Amino acid sequence: MPTKEDIDNWLKAIGKNRKWLAEKCLVQPGQCYNWFAVNGKIPKKKLLLIKSWMEEQTQEVVCIDLPDLDSRGKMEVRLDYETQLKVEKEALRLGMELSAYCTEAVEWCCSQPDIGARLAARLAAKRAAMPAPDTALDIPTTFTGTGTHLQNPKTAPKPDIAQDKPSPQ
């Protein structure tokens, strides 16, 4: 059964709140808020309903075939420009190559017991908020990485902080 924390994470991932949950459960918002109090308990029937809604979100994720065995150990990652900059800066801050940083992030995600449900809920929320088909989308930046090679922090390139600051006029 999902915990209160699981339900809160799910609500956050799908962009909903406890008031919405109360409406969906056909109870007053105050009653729903009481369920999440320290000593509050979610009634078994409502918990089963919530669990089924959470599972529906997970089932909505589109399944794809695994890549050919020849491409195992390699992964293409598509990020928008701003996100890639953030990832690159964090990798540099830690003195890691970009591919090593991304590998560590993916390995960490795989170690999280509820990552599938959380990711499914997030994907469903993104799908619900997708722009109309005629809206121009940002073209993602793509990079391919392999392995987990750590750089020596003493010899790793330092980010050029001057790029982030406007030039004096």
Image (cartoon, rainbow, N blue to C red):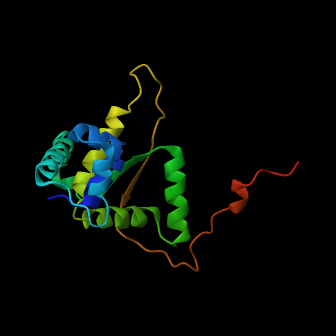
Q: Residue at x 25, y 67 (%)?
A: 111
Furthest toward the right, the residue is 169
Query: Which residue: 54% across, 78% down?
Result: 153
Image point 73% across, 59% down: which residue?
162
Whether residue 13 is visible here, answered yes or no, is: no
Q: Is residue 131 left or right of residue 18?
A: right
92 or 45, nearer to the observer: 45
Residue 15: percent from left, percent from top: 37, 42
Whether residue 161 is visible: yes
Query: What is the count of numbered marks?
Result: 0
Residue 40 position within the rendered picture, expressed as x and y whole percent measured from the top left: 25, 61
Q: Which residue appears at 27% of the width and 46% of the height?
A: 121
The x, y position of residue 82, in whole percent, is: 54, 47
Q: Is residue 62 left or right of residue 133?
A: left
Q: Residue furthest top?
A: 134
Task: Give 133 or 33, whichever is nearer the viewer.
Answer: 33
Q: Nearer the viewer, residue 88 or 132?
A: 132
Query: From the viewer's perspective, is 108 left or right of 166?
Result: left
State whether residue 102 is above or below residue 128.
below
How far from the left and from the top, in percent, is residue 94?
Answer: 51, 72
